């Protein structure tokens, strides 16, 4: 049975349990995928609507457990309008939402979706989609914006992420406090005032060496998205380049949904700073906070040219 015919078959009407889920999508295939996910979870479906009609339909919905938006491509102005409505409604506590789309849409989506009640899935598998729906339905999306609970151990993984980011923040804070807080002083030749210079070749060599490991070992064995993102932002700072969210997701070397969660958590912790692109309202840049940059510079000044990565 094809997707078009499948989505037109309404599930059995039942008014028991939580309110139904409203599905919006930019294609018949997108609506069909979302329908499969919702039905597999045993949830009722309020309606399936194209993104052009979604804002109007949301206004007519008296109650919804959640809104699921499924995207195959860039929906232009109608998509932007819908994303703004979802973000506004989620912020007002009206309902949680799940937005699923491809990596190509990361910048456009993250530029508009800022409320924790919205779960953003990028190229997610069925387990991640089911887990995101469960998080949205339970209200846990308020505590974790980007969820890939199935692959990372759910709430325990979220707590672990928070603890890890807190540890990273504390370490960087000690480094940014200056040489007196560090056991080894930076070499005078590597410093310029209070801000040590970084050898760009050293950073590039470390990044390249880390990438080479995947030729010989499973990438998950060395997954360290926080450090990979910090290295990428250091290199961008040296080269005076701005890094959009999509590029930083790639640099993290983990699934995009996981990378997005790390970006948000590190931003919330004050390690990263989001900057709106003044020339493109559908893109957000990420950079290191000033103290984070100083800490990374002091780190590289202390290690010099590393022999082991």
Image (cartoon, rainbow, N blue to C red):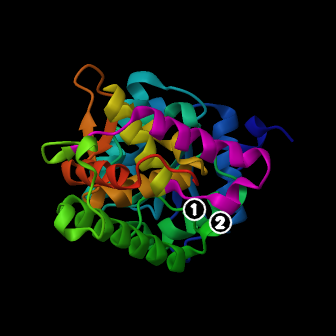
Please tell me which residue lies in front, 36 or 60: 36
The tag on residue 151 is 2
Give coordinates of residue 44: x percent, y percent.
60, 63
Whether residue 98 appears in this view of the structure is no
The quadrant of the picture occupied by the N terminus is top right
Of helix, strand and loop, which one carries label 2? Answer: helix
Dot 2 crowding, Cα within 10 Å, few <14, some 14–19, many 20+: some
Give coordinates of residue 19: x percent, y percent.
48, 67
Looking at the image, which residue is at 37% across and 49% down? 300
Whether residue 176 appears in this view of the structure is yes
The tag on residue 304 is none
Magenta-highlighted stretch: main secondary structure?
A: helix
Looking at the image, which residue is at 32% across and 61% down? 94
Looking at the image, which residue is at 29% across and 70% down? 183
- Pointer 1 residue: 148
Give, as a single range, the part of the protein colored magenta: 196-225
257 falls in the magenta region: no
Looking at the image, which residue is at 18% across and 60% down? 178
Give coordinates of residue 98: x percent, y percent.
49, 53
Q: Is residue 74 above or below residue 252?
A: above
Please tell me which residue lies in front, 144 or 90: 144
């Amino acid at each position: 049975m094809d997707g078009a015919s499948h989505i037109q078959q309404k599930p059995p009407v039942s008014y028991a349990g939580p309110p139904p889920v409203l599905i919006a999508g930019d294609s018949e295939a997108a609506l069909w995928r979302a329908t499969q996910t919702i039905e597999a979870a045993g949830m009722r479906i309020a309606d399936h609507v194209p993104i052009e009609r979604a804002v109007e339909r949301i206004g007519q919905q008296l109650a919804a457990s959640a809104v699921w938006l499924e995207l195959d491509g860039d929906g232009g102005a109608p998509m932007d309008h819908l994303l703004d409505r979802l973000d506004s409604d989620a912020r007002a506590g009206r309902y949680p939402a799940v937005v699923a789309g491809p990596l190509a849409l990361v910048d456009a989506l993250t530029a508009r979706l800022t409320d924790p009640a919205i779960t953003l899935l990028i190229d997610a598998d069925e387990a991640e989609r089911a887990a995101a729906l469960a998080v949205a339905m339970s209200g846990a999306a308020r505590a974790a914006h980007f969820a890939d609970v199935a692959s990372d151990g759910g709430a325990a993984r979220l707590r672990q992420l928070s603890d890890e980011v807190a540890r990273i923040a504390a370490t960087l804070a000690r480094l940014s406090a200056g040489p007196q807080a560090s056991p080894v002083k930076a070499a005078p030749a590597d410093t310029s005032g209070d801000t040590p210079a970084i050898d760009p070749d050293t950073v590039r060599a470390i990044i390249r060496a880390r990438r080479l490991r995947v030729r010989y070992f499973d990438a998950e064995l060395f997954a360290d998205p926080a450090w990979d993102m910090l290295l990428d932002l250091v290199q961008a700072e040296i080269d005076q380049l701005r890094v959009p969210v999509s590029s930083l997701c790639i640099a993290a070397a983990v699934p995009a949904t996981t990378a997005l969660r790390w970006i948000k958590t590190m931003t919330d912790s004050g390690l990263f700073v989001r900057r709106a692109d003044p020339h493109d309202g559908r893109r957000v840049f990420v950079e290191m906070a000033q103290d984070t940059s100083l800490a990374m510079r002091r780190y590289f000044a202390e290690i010099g040219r590393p022999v082991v990565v």
